[in-house]
Image (tube, rainbow, N blue to C red):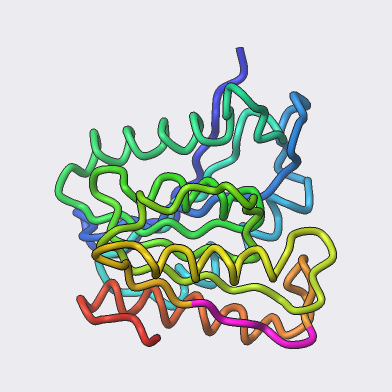
Amino acid sequence: MQSPKLRVLRSRADTPGTIVLVLHGGRATSHAPARGHQLAYLRMRAVARSLHSAGAGCSAQVWLLRNRFRGWNEPDLDAVADARWALERIQREHPQAGIVLVGHSLGGRVALRLTGEPGVRGVCALAPWVEQDEPVEQLRGKPVLIAHGDEDRVTSAAASADYAVRARRQPDAPAVTYRRVPRSGHAMLRRRPEWNALTRRFVRALLAGEEPVR
């Protein structure tokens, strides 16, 4: 049976203080294998490298997950199960490390779902796929950045903005920030430097123990 795969971009420190887990996109329903040459994975491999270079010399590692399947796959939630597998491995190998989740599209939805998992310090969701009834309770007390291109035709920027509003209405409202990336679509190709800057700034703030800029 196919297993999830992890690519680890190591830091100079022997014991990482933080691990950034990067989650790729996919489809609503598909049991086709996720492959390393697919655009959804390659897109987040570039993000992982950007984050790794930004944290060069510090005690952070970047782990890039490749799921078993391309799909979210209700009701089994295969992508969520694979991310939980990765989180369990992090906690087993580096029990003292904080975890930051960075996900795109389907991976953004996975990251948001797992915000409340043990060890997770914050979440960056890029062009996330969220539905109208997407839960928000798990975000309590965690910094969250949601960024969405206003020309996205695959996932909904309006749904992301609404999700952020609903999250902030909770008691003990989480620190949820929504950022619109103008003139950019789902693939994050246009205005890539802005996408990278948003992600890096958020992760750097968490690494430094600072409140991410809202």
Tag count = 0
Left or right position of 201 against 140? right
Is residue 134 depicted above or below 162 in this figure? above
Residue 59: % across, % down: 25, 66
Residue 194, quarter of the rendered image: bottom right
Give me the residue at 33% from left, 34% from top: 89
In terms of depth relative to the viewer, which is nearer, 195 or 161? 161
Residue 33: % across, % down: 73, 28
Left or right position of 101 against 119? right
Quarter placement of the C terminus: bottom left
Residue 133: % across, % down: 58, 47
Q: Residue furthest right?
A: 153
Quarter placement of the N terminus: top right
Is residue 60 depicted above or below 135 in this figure? below
In terms of depth relative to the viewer, which is nearer, 51 or 78? 78
Q: Is 12 in the magenta?
A: no
Residue 87, quarter of the rendered image: top left
Give me the residue at 35% from left, 49% from top: 138
Dominant secondary structure of the residues highlighted in magenta in the image: strand
Q: Residue furthest left?
A: 96
Residue 28: % across, % down: 74, 38
Give me the residue at 62% from left, 50% from top: 24
Q: Is 179 in the magenta?
A: yes
Left or right position of 100 against 49? left
Give me the residue at 50% from left, 68% from top: 164
Residue segment shown in magenta: 178-183
